[in-house]
Image (tube, helix red, strand yellow):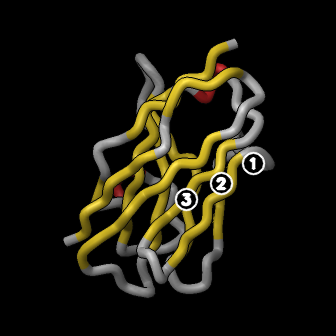
Amino acid sequence: QVQLVESGGGLVQAGDSLRLSCAASGRIFSSDAMGWFRQAPGKEREFVAAVNWDFGNTHYADSVKGRFTISRDRAKNTVYLQLNNLKPEDTAVYYCAASRYQNRNRERDYGYWGQGTQVTVSS
């Protein structure tokens, strides 16, 4: 079992930055991956970014490439999502998730989820 707790969301203006954190506890294996998803009002949850727990390989949704950066601190069992140059369309609840598989962007491949943190970007 893996427990995930997100923090760092808030209300910001367009162009601002935020850093989300996800503290993980429980059994995390080197072969696991951690990801961030988001769900905007009235829309389905979508993949944002993921990082492999062992070597830190990352991949991103096209909509956030060059603006968002995912990273992990294995010593702290924490995953971060740095959000730069935020846009109103980035407004969503952001969820941290853990997967027993690497290099996945499908929601169904992630078996553990946090409660989410709200990010609101005003224009």
Secondary structure under tag 2 reads strand
Q: Residue furthest top?
A: 123
Q: Quadrant of residue 3?
A: bottom left
**Side (left or right) of 14 relative to 51:** right
Secondary structure under tag 3 reads strand
Kind of residue sitting beneath label 3: Tyr
Q: Position of residue 122 (x, y in %)?
A: 63, 15
Q: Which residue is mark 3?
A: 80
**Side (left or right) of 112 relative to 119:** left
Closer to us: 32 or 22: 22
Q: Name the residue at 42% across, 47% down.
A: 7
Q: Which residue is mark 1?
A: 65
Vertical arrangement, residue 31 with respect to residue 114, above or below: below
Separation (CA) of disc 2 from disc 3: 14 Å
Separation (CA) of disc 1 from disc 3: 15 Å
Q: Name the residue at 61% across, 77% down.
A: 56
Q: Position of residue 53 (x, y in %)?
A: 50, 78
Vertical arrangement, residue 39 with respect to residue 104, above or below: above
Q: Nearer the viewer, mark 1 or mark 3?
A: 3
Q: Position of residue 104 (x, y in %)?
A: 50, 63
Q: Name the residue at 29% across, 44% down.
A: 115
Give the mark, 2 or 3, whose residue is nearer the N terminus: 2
Residue neighbourhood size for the residue with mark 1, other residues' Cα within 10 Å, grouped as few (<14), some (14–19), many (≥20) = few
Q: Are marks 1 and 2 in contact (CB under 8 Å)?
A: yes
Closer to us: 18 or 87: 18
Q: Which residue is mark 2?
A: 60
